[in-house]
Amino acid sequence: MTEHYIDAIGFMCPVPNMMVQEKLEQIKPGDVIILETDHSCAAVSIINDMKKKKIRATSREIDNGIWRVTIKL
């Protein structure tokens, strides 16, 4: 299992989701993507997109205005 970190601080939708889509093409089953963003709409968008793809994803606010999205393949 490998953790892949994406720093999406400062990027607005749809850029964080595009970053995740690009990373999904490069990782293996069992890997984890951790994305941090300062836009709550990006976190919600990514979670909804992963649900459609039947990929486990969670989101939580780790600091005031900073969300961490964890995606497990």
Image (cartoon, helix red, strand yellow):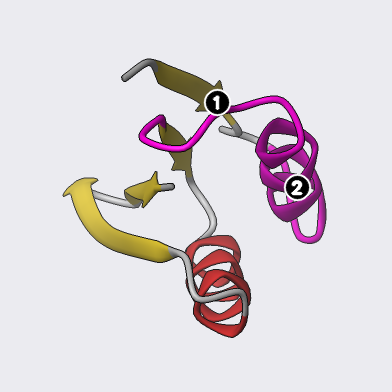
Residue ID at (47%, 65%): 55
> Neighbour class for label 2 at 10 Å: few (<14), some, many (≥20)?
some
Which of the two residues, 8 or 73, is positioned nearer the viewer here?
Answer: 73
Position of residue 28 measured from the top left corner of the image (x, y, whole percent): 54, 29
User: Three-letter amino acid code at disc 2?
Assistant: Gln
Which of the two residues, 63 or 6, is positioned nearer the viewer here?
Answer: 6
* Cα–Cα gap, marks 2 and 1: 11 Å
- Where residue 58 is drawn, which disc sits there? none
Which of the two residues, 55 or 60, is positioned nearer the viewer here?
Answer: 55
Would residue 62 appear left or right of 66 to someone viewing this image?
Answer: left
Identify whether 3 is placed above or below 21.
above
- Where does label 2 land, which residue? 21
Which of the two residues, 28 or 7, is positioned nearer the viewer here?
Answer: 28
Q: Is residue 29 magenta?
A: yes
Q: Earlier in the sequence, mark 2 or mark 1?
A: 1
Would residue 1 appear left or right of 35 to someone viewing this image?
Answer: left
Would residue 70 appear left or right of 53 to someone viewing this image?
Answer: left
Would residue 61 appear left or right of 40 to someone viewing this image?
Answer: left
Instruction: Please give the range of residues in magenta.
Output: 11-31
- Where does label 1 land, which residue? 6
User: Three-letter amino acid code at disc 1?
Assistant: Ile
Q: Is residue 39 magenta?
A: no
Identify whether 56 is placed above or below 66.
below
Q: Image quadrant for the N terminus?
A: top left
Outermost residue to the front: 29
**For numbered disc 1, what is the local secondary structure?**
strand
Position of residue 53 measured from the top left corner of the image (x, y, whole percent): 61, 74
Residue ID at (37%, 15%): 2
Identify whether 18 is placed above or below 23.
below
Residue ID at (81%, 59%): 14
> Neighbour class for label 1 at 10 Å: few (<14), some, many (≥20)?
some
